[in-house]
Image (cartoon, grey):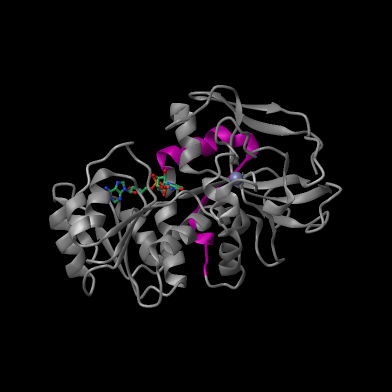
Amino acid sequence: MAKDNLTAVLYGIEDMRLEQRPIPEIADDEVLLAMDCVGICGSDVHYLQHGRIGDFVLTKPMVIGHESAGVVTKLGKKVTNLKVGDRVAIEPGVPCRYCDHCKGGQYNLCPGMVFCATPPYDGNLTRYYKHAADFCFKLPDHVSMEEGALLEPLSVGVHACKRAGVTLGSKVLILGAGPIGLVTLLAAQSMGASEILITDLLQQRLDVAKELGATHTLLLNRDQTAEETAKLVRKTMSGEPDKSIDCCGAESSARLAIFATRSGGVVVVVGMGAAEVKLPLINALAREVDVRGVFRYCNDYASALALVASGKVNVKRLVTHHFDIKETDKAFETSRKGLGGAIKVMIHVQPRNTNN
Ligand code: NAD
Ligand code: ZN
């Protein structure tokens, strides 16, 4: 294993640098991890391009990366749930554990959340990284490190489906077939949805959704209104969807989600677009369509791991590209431009497949 600590640090807009950082010292409840692989997420690309997401603003250099897995190399004195050599998926957000939200079981809403690569906190595209031991999930031998890293987006999909109340026989409309739409599709299938229609503006993304088992796909026509498209959704499915999950963040998409959803159904908004959007609120209230937000995940990593470990969900198809940490610039270029049909771009901190 490398002795250096090569690290990808975002200094500002379009200014990513690879540099050596000291190997971190761990606290009693932490572990030191030799990072294995880190997936690139849309938010990482957004920080590179804009230096901010909403109120989270990059004001000092920040290590990038948060969809990751690594190997335990050192244990804090109080750590009992892990051993040196364990391969783990890293849940990247560590809450305070003391506030009302944490105690009430919604730790994703903790105001004291320390989340990898959300300013001002460092991420983990680095060779050595320390993390709270109770937010590391040991991977069974047959689950790969890449699958471990993919538990991060998969947890978003699991959380979105739980918030929507997807269950046996649900008819689900998913808007957007990017990585988040695709993991939401996988989660909805495993939670018993009988029909899933997924939309996108790109046929190539819909083809992947079809391959992953979407029962219907719909290539959107930008000239059609949300009401017209809603009719098309109903015609394509065997009726109105009872759950709609927006995974792209466009205003037109949230509008379509409301118009298309069956009366008494649920719209879940995962996609983050403009801070304010125009929605048909009266249509939603008059038909008791509940609109719910999703912020990351909460107690979903274990479910996501169980889905992958049991073979119920196969996330491997999402990974389209592999790069070494030294090629971080190229990896980000591939992800942001969607080069070569890129869906999930994985950066390897250790030589690929070293830890399987
Ligand atoms: P992505 O940009 O890779 O994928 C979005 C997909 O939506 C693309 O395939 C795009 O072609 C498609 N699209 C664009 N406009 C559309 C429209 N009007 N109708 C249907 N499809 C459309 O992004 P991603 O990584 O898959 O993430 C999706 C969204 O989820 C982003 O907005 C991201 O910020 C958000 N997100 C939210 C959370 C959360 O906690 N709420 C977590 C992760 C990601
Ligand atoms: Zn808290």
Locate residue 250: give its quadrant.
Answer: top left
- Residue depicted at 19% across the width and 67% down the height: 234
13 is higher (above) or lower (below) than 96: above
Residue 68 visible in the snapshot: yes
In the current view of this chain or complex, which residue is farthest to the front? 100
Percent of width and height locating residue 164: 38, 62
Judge whether residue 336 is colored magenta: yes
The residue nearer to you, when weighing 265 against 84, is 265
Is 243 placed above or below 16 here? below
**Residue 344 image position (x, y, % from top left):** 49, 49
Image quadrant where one finds the N terminus: top right
Residue shown at 52%/53% (left/top)? 297
Residue name at image x 62 percent, y 51 percent: 91
Task: State the residue at coordinates (17%, 55%).
Answer: 283
What residue range appears in magenta?
313-338
Compared across the picture, whether 126 is left or right of 49 comes to right
Q: Is residue 353 among the parts visible in the rendering?
A: no
| Vertical comparison of 212 with 146: above or below | below
